[in-house]
Amino acid sequence: MKKLPKLSERLQAIADMVPYGSAVADIGTDHAYIPVYLTNKGISKFAYASDVKKGPLLRAKSTIREFDAQRAVETRMGNGLESIKCGEADTVIIAGMGGILISNILDNSKDVLSEVKTLILQPMTAVYELRKYLYENDYTVSDEILVKEENKLYTVIKAIHGKDDVQSELQLHIGKKLIENNDKLLPELLNKYINKLTKQINGLSFAEVTEERSLKLKSCKNLLAQINSIYNS
Ligand SMILES: C[S@@+](CC[C@H](N)C(=O)[O-])C[C@H]1O[C@@H](n2cnc3c(N)ncnc32)[C@H](O)[C@@H]1O
């Protein structure tokens, strides 16, 4: 069997969150590196590599053949979790997509998800919106980690069923677990937020006053003060 190449830091962080012995569905698999890695290392007995598009699925099939994983990884074609039947997977990975798309995929397959124990999600955008979706839909973020690749920060979220104890909007913006775990990249994330909020506040301060803008300005200032207090603590 050909030796697996090293996974990128982002993909490795995702793979490291998969519980040992899981049956995995990797939704939006593209190259299928994660399912092939997990089954090759014996972390997962069986995995589904699913994608909505033909091109990515051809890439997935080629990786599966190249690393002789045909018996352990099955490709599926379909939109989101529609390709997976109830009970087939106990861990679902959705990585490399926007947070809104990930939320929509989760929202469209509540029946399949009722039998899934662990979600591992790696949103490229709209991380706040995804954390909010998880909270409002009775998921708990049981772990979260930041990864830096080519100067970009990525978050990897592990979620399980059960209502989370979220106390503030700040925890949804920054990530409760990232704060609790004092993630080694947290200062970089806070810095990015501070810069973004400062620009937003400047823009809003010079714009014509409306009720909506005043409320937005107040909430940005409030969030900035809370972030500054974690940053300086
Ligand atoms: C940027 S790639 C990410 C590949 C891999 N998961 C990773 O993180 O490196 C996004 C993949 O998601 C697939 N995709 C987008 N929308 C999807 C959907 N609704 N259902 C399944 N796959 C989807 C795309 O075809 C593409 O292959």
Image (spheres, helix red, strand yellow):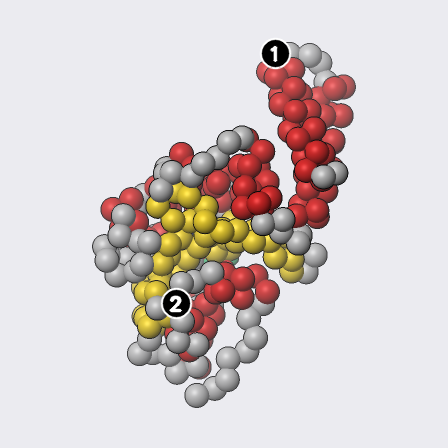
Horizontal and vertical percent for residue 63?
Answer: 44, 75
Horizontal and vertical percent for residue 84?
Answer: 28, 57
**In-front residue for pair 81/177:** 177
Q: Nearer the viewer, mark 1 or mark 2?
A: 2
Horizontal and vertical percent for residue 60?
Answer: 42, 70
Q: Is residue 18 visible?
A: yes
**In-front residue for pair 38/19:** 19
Picture quadrant of residue 36? bottom left
Image: 140 above or below 118: above
Image: 98 above or below 15: above
Query: Could you tell which of marks 1 and 2 lies nearer the N-terminus?
Result: 2
Picture quadrant of residue 137? top left
Residue positioned 52% across, 51% down in the render: 144
Residue positioned 47% across, 41% down in the render: 130
Tell me the tag on residue 211: 1
- Is residue 61 rendered to the left or right of residue 97? left
- Is residue 11 rendered to the left or right of residue 203? left
- Is residue 212 rendered to the left or right of residue 205? left
Tell me the tag on residue 20: 2
View quadrant of ligand 1: bottom left
- Specify whether tag 2 is near ligand 1 (CB below 8 Å): no
Alpha-carbon neighbours of circle 1 within 10 Å: few (<14), some, or many (≥20)? Answer: few
Tell me the kind of residue under disc 1.
Glu
Tell me the kind of residue under disc 2.
Tyr
Picture quadrant of residue 64? bottom left
Q: Is residue 154 visible?
A: no
Label 2: state its secondary structure.
loop
Tell me the tag on residue 22: none
Report the residue that reaches farthest toward the bottom: 1
Residue positioned 50% across, 84% down in the render: 3
